[in-house]
Image: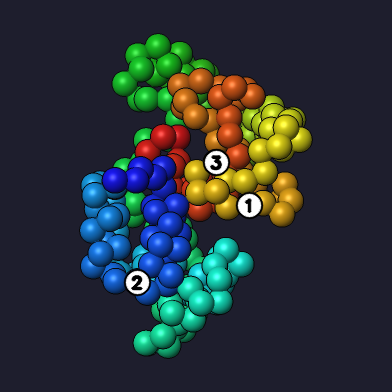
């Protein structure tokens, strides 16, 4: 049995293998065998089907494959609207982002830092609720920018080294725009050795079970 890192990669491969003549029950069986924790259901398949026939995955499939997929019930955008991409990711696997909460060192130090920041923000804002909100947002945005500054050059170096396809599903990237960086080992930080480039869907899906 083939192994897949993401459901998207499995769906794409299955459609190529059957040339678009999809049997939903067979596809579901493959999803369940490869991803036993997945909450895969018909709405997920409807979303993929729409995106392949008429949406952003269209370019990855032949006219024959798309024609076979479009036969039968006519596909409407309302059947699988764009927000379903979030639902697919949310329904696929349980969320375990970031360092494991059970790590006592991370939890102890992190809680101390967080409590200190909260104290300083509350002290600075006093009774001004709006100021407290703005300070919280300012601190959060600056910490996020710090991480982005670390990720950006790594992303560029991976791209320039020839990594220009999604490392999970094989989707080719036309440019660096929209490409997402993913840490292979979520216990480690961002580095060339620990990072890979993924498409948005695969990053969302893998993020649900690997950070």
User: Viewer-proximal residue, 129 or 175?
Assistant: 175
Residue carrying label 3:
167
Q: Callout 2: 10 Å neighbours few (<14), some, many (20+)?
A: some
- Mark 1 and mark 2 lie on one chain; the one further toward the N terminus is 2
Disc 2 element: loop
At 53% from the left and 30% from the top, the residue drawn is 183
Residue 78 drawn above or below residue 19:
below
Residue carrying label 2:
22
Residue carrying label 1:
172
Residue 150 drawn above or below residue 108:
below
Q: Which mark is residue 97?
A: none
Question: Answer yes or no: do the residues labelled 3 and 2 have beta carbons within 8 Å?
Answer: no
- Res. 46 image quadrant: bottom left
Tell me how far mark 1 sits from mark 2, CA to CA. 24 Å
Give the image location of residue 113, x and y in percent. 51, 18
Give the image location of residue 71, x and y in percent. 41, 85
Residue 74 drawn above or below residue 176:
below
User: Viewer-proximal residue, 67 or 98?
Assistant: 67
At 69% from the left and 33% from the top, the residue drawn is 158
Disc 3 element: loop
User: Viewer-proximal residue, 185 or 14?
Assistant: 14
Tell me how far mark 1 sits from mark 3, CA to CA. 9 Å
């Amino acid at each position: 049995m083939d192994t897949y890192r993401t459901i998207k990669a499995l769906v794409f491969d299955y459609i190529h293998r059957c040339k678009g003549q999809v049997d939903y029950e067979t596809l579901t069986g493959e999803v369940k065998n490869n991803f036993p924790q997945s909450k895969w259901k018909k709405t997920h398949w409807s979303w993929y089907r729409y995106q392949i026939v008429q949406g952003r995955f269209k370019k990855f499939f032949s006219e024959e494959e798309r024609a076979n997929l479009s036969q039968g019930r006519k596909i409407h955008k309302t059947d699988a609207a764009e927000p379903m991409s979030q639902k697919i990711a949310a329904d696929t696997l349980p969320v375990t982002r970031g360092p494991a909460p059970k790590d006592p060192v991370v939890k102890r130090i992190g809680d101390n830092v967080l409590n200190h920041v909260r104290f300083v923000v509350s002290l600075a804002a006093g009774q001004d609720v709006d100021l407290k909100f703005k300070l919280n947002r300012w601190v959060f945005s600056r910490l996020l920018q710090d991480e982005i500054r670390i990720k950006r050059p790594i992303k560029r170096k991976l791209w320039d080294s020839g990594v220009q396809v999604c490392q999970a599903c094989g989707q080719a990237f036309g440019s660096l725009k929209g490409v997402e960086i993913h840490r292979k080992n979520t216990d480690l930080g961002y580095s060339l050795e620990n990072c890979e480039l993924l498409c948005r869907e695969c990053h969302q899906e893998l993020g649900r079970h690997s950070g």
